[in-house]
Amino acid sequence: MKIDDIKKLHQKKYRSEFGHFLVEGEHLILELEKAATSNPLLAKSEIYATENFHNFPSPFKTHLVSEKQMAQMSDTKTPQGIVAVVPILPKVPTQIGNQKTIYLYEVQDPGNLGTILRSLGWFGNFRCLLSPGSVDPYNPKVVRSSMGAIFHVPMELDVPLAVLAQQFKTIGSLDMNGKPLSDASFKNCDCYVFGNEARGVPREELQKMEAQAFTISGCGAIESLNLASAVNMCVYELMR
């Protein structure tokens, strides 16, 4: 891929057009290499690196670039000197085995999404569905904060909230007046819905899909939890 095209991958429309996204930094590229051993599409990734990484051992095709070119490709103020151009994986529309499904409705914060993917990747056996209007999971900030989990968590994008009731028999959501997470029924849901950081999930939609409400008990001193924190607690409870 030409350097000018690689620079365009900072924008969502070009990531969609070219079918690739950027991964920056040695740690993330090492995680990419691990994932590529079992995924032929990821194995087609290519590396662009400065002279500092000329001895970097990698199974990927590698291109040497100048410091100036690296600065143009990098999304960070201090380029790390190595980036990979990675194919976007196709959607995974069906559950595999005993996977649980996490559905995120219009999540906006890249750090939240990256942190959630990191937790799902840590525990395994989860897939992530994103509603229309959600932050692009291939946004460089999401990719960095996922710490490589984005290569391991199956995702499906632009899934309308309204179709969940057709795909899942039992749906769980969070509500201040719900059952505690310790209730046995919490682990029996097929899909868990989490809402936008500010607006949550439309209550009327939850009622239509007959979502079961659950509560993360707290002392009541503050109004709400951070979205990523709430998802992480629920995922931990599911795996406990």
Image (tube, grey):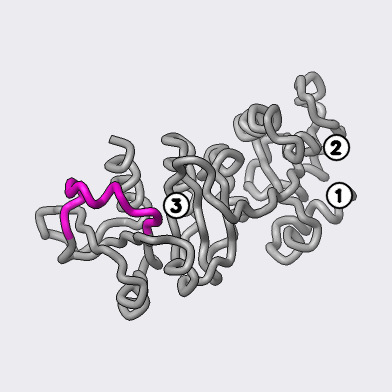
For residue 214, which numbered disc appears in the image?
none
Q: SS class of the residue under badge 2?
A: loop
- At a point 29% along the width and 46% down the height, the residue shown is 233
Kind of residue at badge 1:
Ile
Q: Residue at x 31, y 42 (%)?
A: 238
Percent x, y for residue 217? Answer: 15, 53
Percent coordinates x, y for residue 128 in the rendering: 50, 52
Tell me the quadrant of the picture where the C terminus can be found.
Answer: top left
Mark 1 vs mark 3: in front = 3
Q: CA distance from mark 2 to mark 3?
A: 41 Å
Q: Secondary structure at mark 3?
A: strand
The residue identified by callout 1 is: 3
Please determine whether, in this image, residue 33 is positioned above or below residue 146. above
Q: Give the number of the disc on residue 101.
A: 3
Q: Nearer the viewer, residue 168 or 41?
A: 168
Can the viewer see residue 217? yes
Residue 109 belongs to magenta span: no
Amino acid bearing label 3: Thr
Q: Is residue 125 above or below residue 185?
A: above
Q: Which residues are magenta?
A: 179-192
Q: Earlier in the sequence, mark 2 or mark 3?
A: 2
- Label 2 sits on residue: 65
CB within 8 Å, label 2 to label 1: yes
N-terminal of the pair, mark 1 or mark 3, is 1
